[in-house]
Image: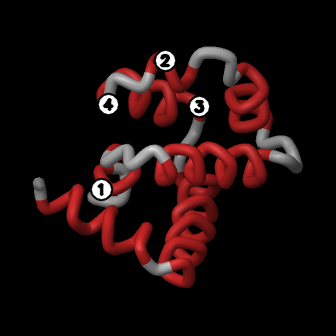
Amino acid sequence: MSARSRILAHIRDDETNLARFRVELAEAATMRLDIGDWKKFVVLHRLEDWADGRSRFYRSIQWRDSDAEDEVLDSVSRLVEHGDEAVLISTES
């Protein structure tokens, strides 16, 4: 098991840590990442399958709609629930 996998497993094992991680990552991502950054993230981490059908997500991010943070929180939550290490990689920059 890689270090990233162990970190994600530790976060997922504690409900308080998991909730805090999801919210803080979603807030940071909403403020810092634009549509181009999200598209690069998807390609770099081979998340095209995840991104399929996410047109609402991309539209919200592109136009900074009021529901953009909700869309990001939902997306972060789904990635964390599926154990995707990409959510940790996104925090390294």
Lower position in the chain sequence, tag 1 or tag 2 = 2
On the image, which quarter does residue 11 sit in?
bottom left
Residue at the image position 11 percent from the left and 55 percent from the top: 2
Front disc: 3 or 2: 2
Residue at the image position 33 percent from the left and 56 percent from the top: 88
Of the numbered discs in the image, which one, if any, rests on residue 49? Answer: 2
Mark 3, residue position: 35
Mark 1, residue position: 93
Could you give the CA–CA distance between mark 4 and mark 2, rounded to whole angstroms?
11 Å
Q: What element carries label 1?
A: loop
Front disc: 3 or 4: 4
Residues at marks 1 and 3 touching, judged by CB atoms closer than 8 Å: no
Q: Position of residue 87 (x, y in %)?
A: 40, 51
Three-letter amino acid code at the position of disc 3: Ile
Front disc: 4 or 2: 2
Could you give the CA–CA distance between mark 1 and mark 3, rounded to whole angstroms?
17 Å
Lower position in the chain sequence, tag 4 or tag 1 = 4
Three-letter amino acid code at the position of disc 2: Asp
Residue at the image position 56 percent from the left and 65 percent from the top: 22
Say above or below: 88 vs 6.
above
Mark 4, residue position: 45
